[in-house]
Image (spheres, rainbow, N blue to C red):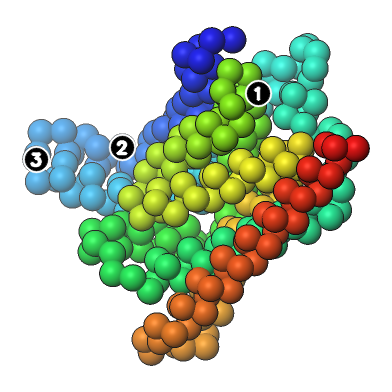
């Protein structure tokens, strides 16, 4: 496969996933807009503006549900497409073969360390106000609803489906034409851009690179899924723990410095161990 064909083929899964996200959002909008309000706003600019603002607020409050519906639509489509193919979707994504527990442990260590370090960096440095507002709005939308749905979406559904999309499909396709390092960097850029939010896109670039190497070294999507689950869960739990400890007080910069140092140390340790095991097994 040529490089250009591989690149555009690698865009297919993210494009389908994004398309389903738009579809799910439109369905939610149709459900949430009262028909009478829509008719009233047709010829009234002020009412139209208010309707748009109200609808945006409503859609943000249902971000988690939209994410879950998007995931179900995407996975359902992929299962239909691959239903009569050999290898099956599960074999193609390297979800069938077993993965060593040691791999999963190191993948979890890398995920935890990476999130801890990025949490320290993001919280300890000055970032543009617009980025911070956009990020806060996104965080409130994800955490402000039903706690069970939030845990399900953030800690399980999103990690699994996003790994299927970006590592299972995009990276696997890119590796048919590019070097492993180039494939990992390209899919990480796609992964970063997909998140949209400027601040989130910045740190998910690093997460995408590390998840790509975990996928490569473990030779199984389960390693990358474990990395992603722990990464997201650390964010979910870490914010709650920090708020409970410091309440409304400003968190000292020394705490963020410890997060960065300890997090990167853990991530580097996990990467080194995974790489070492992989090289030994390849040599044998």
Q: Does residue 155 lie above or below 5 as drawn?
A: below
For residue 148, side relative to residue 284 (left or right): left
Q: CA distance from mark 3 to mark 1?
A: 42 Å
For residue 62, side relative to residue 235 (left or right): left
Residue depth check, mark 2 versus mark 3: number of the one nearer the observer: 3
Q: Which mark is residue 45?
A: 3
Residue behind mark 2: 35
Q: Position of residue 88 (x, y in %)?
A: 79, 20
Tell which circle, 2 or 1, labels the residue nearer the N-terminal end.
2
Along the line of sight, the residue nearer the viewer: 51 or 274: 274
Crowd band around label 1 with a 10 angstrom C-alpha radius: few (<14), some (14–19), many (20+): few
Residue plotted at (46% across, 88% down): 246
Residue depth check, mark 3 versus mark 1: number of the one nearer the observer: 1
Give the quarter of the figure containing the N terminus.
top right
Residue depth check, mark 2 versus mark 1: number of the one nearer the observer: 1
Residue plotted at (86% across, 41% down): 281
Residue plotted at (73% across, 42% down): 217
Label 3: state its secondary structure: helix
Q: Are marks 2 and 3 in contact (CB under 8 Å)?
A: no
- Which quadrant of the structure image shows residue 137? bottom left
Label 1: state its secondary structure: helix
Q: Which mark is residue 78?
A: 1
């Amino acid at each position: 496969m040529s490089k250009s064909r591989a690149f555009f083929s690698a865009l297919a899964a993210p494009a389908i996933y994004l398309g389903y996200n738009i579809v799910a959002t439109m369905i939610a909008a149709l459900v949430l807009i009262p028909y009478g309000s829509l008719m009233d706003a047709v010829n009234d600019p002020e009412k139209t503006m208010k309707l748009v603002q109200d609808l945006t607020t409503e859609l943000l409050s249902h971000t988690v549900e939209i994410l879950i519906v998007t995931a179900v639509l995407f996975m359902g489509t992929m299962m239909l497409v691959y239903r009569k193919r050999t290898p099956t979707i599960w074999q193609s994504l390297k979800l069938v073969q077993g993965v060593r527990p040691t791999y999963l442990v190191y993948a979890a260590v890398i995920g935890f360390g990476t999130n801890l370090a990025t949490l320290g960096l993001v919280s300890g440095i000055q970032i543009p106000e617009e980025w911070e507002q956009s990020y806060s709005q996104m965080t409130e939308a994800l955490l402000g609803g039903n706690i069970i749905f939030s845990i399900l979406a953030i800690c399980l559904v999103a990690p699994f489906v996003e790994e299927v999309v970006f590592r299972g499909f995009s990276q696997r396709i890119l590796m048919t034409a590019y070097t492993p390092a180039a494939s990992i960097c390209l899919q990480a850029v796609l992964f970063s851009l997909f998140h949209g939010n400027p601040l989130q896109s910045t740190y998910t670039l690093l997460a995408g690179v590390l998840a790509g190497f975990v996928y490569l070294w473990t030779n199984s999507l389960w390693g990358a899924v474990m990395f992603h689950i722990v990464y997201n869960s650390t964010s979910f739990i870490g914010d709650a723990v920090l708020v409970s400890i410091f309440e409304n007080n400003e968190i000292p910069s020394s705490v963020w410095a410890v997060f960065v140092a300890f997090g990167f140390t853990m991530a580097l340790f996990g990467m080194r161990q995974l790489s070492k095991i992989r090289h030994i097994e390849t040599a044998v």
